[in-house]
Every structure is written in C-alpha cells, then in structure tokens.
Image (tube, grey):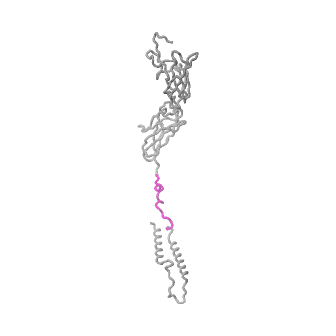
Amino acid sequence: MTGSTSRSIAALLAVIVLVAACGATPTSLSPPSAAAAPGATSPPATFVARAEQDADARFLLAARAALPDVLATPSHSSAATTPAAEQTGASTSAALVLGGTWVTPRAGARLTSYTTTLSARSTASGPGETTVTKVVFSATWAGATKTVMCTATRPSDAGVWSCKANLLALRVPPGRVTFSFDVYGVGVPIARSPAGTRLVTYAVQPPRPTSTHWEKIGTKTTDGPIIGTYFLRWSAPAGYADEFLAYETHECPRESKKNDGTPCFVAGTPVDVSKLELVARSPGNARSVKVQLSEHDCDGHGTILLRARNAYGRSVFAIVEAVNVYWPDPNEIIC
C-alpha cells in the first residue's frame, strides 16, 4: 500500500467519525427549548430543517474535496506490469518447422522406365525436437488429381528417404508428370511440399497388349482366295497407346525337325519386321477389331501378332495366333 493511499483512507475515516459524532441528520436536531429569552421569536420549524440540511451538504462537499483523487481512479493492477505473453499464454519462441530437399528425380528428367525411385532429405529448423516418421511422394498429371506414388518409412544411413513407384501399376500415363513430397513428424505440423515440385517427362513406350482372344466369325468364298473374318480382342492400360497394329507373317523362325508341331513364335522369338503385313489398325482407346484375311486351302493364314504404339515407341509384340512348325517327312507330298 502506497503512502498516498494510506493518507486517503485515514481522511475518510476521520470524516465518517465526525459525521457520526455530530449526528448530522435532519431529525436529530431539536427546536429551541422553552427557556429562551422572553420576547424572543423562534424561527419556523421548516426554516430550521432547511438550514440544517444546507449545513450537512456543505460539510459533505468539504469532506469529499478532502479525499485524494486516488479513490476515484482505479489502482495499478498486477496486469499492468505483466508481459503480454504471460497474460495470453502465447509462446515467446518460434515453433519447430519441418522441411526437406529433393534428391531424385532431377528437374526436367526423362523417365524411360515404368518404375522410378523417388527420394528426398528431411530437414528441421527452430527450437524443439521431433522424430520424422515418413516422407510421402505424390504426383499429378493432366486430368488427374494428386495421387500418392509411394511412402518412405525410414531413411538410409546417409539420411535419404527413398521409395520406388510403379507408374504403370499406378496408371500414370506417358507425358508430363509433376512430383511433390510431404514430410511427417511427431507432434509437429506436416511440411507440405517444402521443396516445391519436380516436373519430368514420363517417356515410355506402351506395354505389350495382354489377354488376346482370336475367333473366326465368318467366311466368304470368292473366285479367288477364301476371305476369313476374325474378331480380335485384347487388354491394355488406358492412356498408353496412340494406336494398336495387327500384323500377319508367314515367317517361322523356329522351323526345325525338333520343333515340329510347336509354335513358330514363342515369347522372346525375334521378329523380322520386313516380313510383316499390316492387316488391321485401331485407335488407342479401342480394345477389339475385326480382321479379314486371305486363306489358302493348305495352310490357312499365317501367324497373327499385335503391338501398341505411342509417341515414345512401340510395344513388344503380343502373339495372338501362332502357326505351328510343320516338318514334313521326306516322302510326303506338300500342296
């Protein structure tokens, strides 16, 4: 308690005691007694009461004037000397911030494989500690929303977080692809794309068509060769092929006595493209086509092969229908 406050309280107490001693109320005052001097005239009772009230008012005004301004002014509180950070509970230091830097792929890279390695280093700045738990790599491309490619769950001895992404299995089409990564830690906000994005070109040829089906659906006899109509169906991932090409070949690379009765083409058999005849062409979004072939009485048609093509190359051939090796006996008549 300050000295001015003590003096103010003492003055107030003195006024209260004085008022109590004087009995300063209108009803405590009595009119003059009967022993007044002969011939003296008493003032009217209303005049006496009014005078007493005026005296009381002057007394209270004087008492109020004697009190210091401190009674009308709020005292200094502890909040006035408390720092703002203590009043609000706000932190006085910056929070720990996660970050990271790219390792692979490099900006503008040309990816020529369906599988690629994505990697980055994690960083942290500011006070405090945390444990990085994972780095999530994502990608976007034309017509698609952000898609997770793979998640790195532990760093290498060199502190690099890496994982492999199979872009074919994730249905990422060839063309421009934008990669990003997010860093996750314990008890801290996620670092969203702290190193920005990496734009690359996914330059791969389409994969080999699969699940081929070959079925004859009609025959037309003419003055010349017989025309057979066939239905060809296959499977392929969307967005990889610009077109599909069906070929016929009468080549038989595996022709030998030991291979008699086995297919002329098996997986891995080289194809002489100079001996191919294009028999059907269909757009990249097609998965079937009708094929018409000239057939001969002796050997029918040749081997049917199918491949896909895009701006970055051609797929491996799919063997749709392979003719078997025919090794005749020495005395056999061949038509």
User: From this viewpoint, is residue 131 visible?
Assistant: yes
How many callouts does the rendering have?
A: 0
In the image, is residue 62 above or below residue 279?
A: below
Q: Position of residue 201 (x, y in %)?
A: 53, 33
In the image, is residue 133 above or below residue 51?
A: above
Depth check, front residue: 217 or 205: 217
Depth check, front residue: 86 or 203: 203
Q: Position of residue 226 (x, y in %)?
A: 55, 17
Residue drawn at the location 51% of the way across and 87% of the way down: 36
Q: Position of residue 206 (x, y in %)?
A: 51, 28
In the image, is residue 204 above or below residue 41?
A: above
- Quarter location, residue 219: top right
Q: Residue furthest top?
A: 331
For the record, the magenta segment spans 71-91
User: From this viewpoint, is residue 311 visible?
Assistant: no
Q: Residue furthest bottom?
A: 38
Depth check, front residue: 331 or 221: 221
- Magenta stretch holds residue 87: yes
The reply, left or right, for residue 223 in relation to residue 333 is right
- Magenta stretch holds residue 300: no
Q: Position of residue 333 (x, y in %)?
A: 49, 10
- Quarter location, residue 286: top right
Q: Residue furthest left?
A: 157
Q: Quadrant of the N terminus?
A: bottom left
